[in-house]
């Protein structure tokens, strides 16, 4: 049975999005936990920042992989803003 290429591409995209959001959720939960542990055990040395920064860099790369380089201020965003400003005048 041949599968639809559009369906397969959409399935891969959804799987990538799901993986990104799961990783982001775990990033927040683990780093909040590490912050609490850090403040309770050795508040004079904030070591949790190293995990926060290292894992954060990984999250950024994964975001670029999933959403693309122009996800935040891409052409769709530009068109939306242009229309928004034109409607104000």
Image: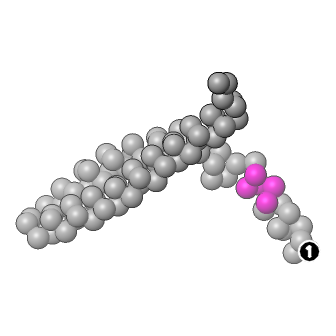
Residue farthest toward the bottom in the current orientation of the protein: 88
Residue farthest toward the front in the current orientation of the protein: 1
Residue at point 67%, 52% (across, down):
73
Between residue 77 and residue 3, name the one nearer to us: 3
Residue at point 66%, 29% (across, down):
3
Q: Position of residue 70 (x, y in %)?
A: 65, 45
Residue that numbered label 1 is attached to: 89
Task: Report if residue 49 lies within the magenta region.
Answer: no
Q: Is residue 46 left or right of residue 7?
A: left
Between residue 29 and residue 75, name the one nearer to us: 29
| 74 w.r.t. 5: above or below | below
**Image quadrant where residue 10 sits:** top right
The part of the chain drawn in magenta is 76-80
Residue at point 25%, 50% (across, down):
50
- Which quadrant would the N terminus be assigned to in this image? top right
Residue at point 51%, 43% (across, down):
15
Please identify the dominant SS of the magenta region.
helix
| 56 w.r.t. 35: above or below | above
**Model colouring:** one colour
Q: Is residue 32 left or right of residue 70?
A: left
């Amino acid at each position: 049975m041949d599968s639809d290429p559009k369906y397969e591409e959409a399935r891969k995209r959804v799987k990538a999005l799901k993986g990104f959001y799961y990783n982001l959720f775990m990033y927040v939960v683990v780093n909040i936990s590490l912050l609490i542990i850090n403040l309770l055990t050795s508040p004079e040395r904030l070591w949790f920042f190293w995990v926060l920064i290292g894992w954060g860099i990984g999250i950024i790369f994964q975001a670029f992989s999933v959403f693309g380089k122009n996800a935040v201020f891409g052409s769709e965003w530009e068109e939306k803003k242009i229309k928004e400003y034109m409607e104000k005048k």
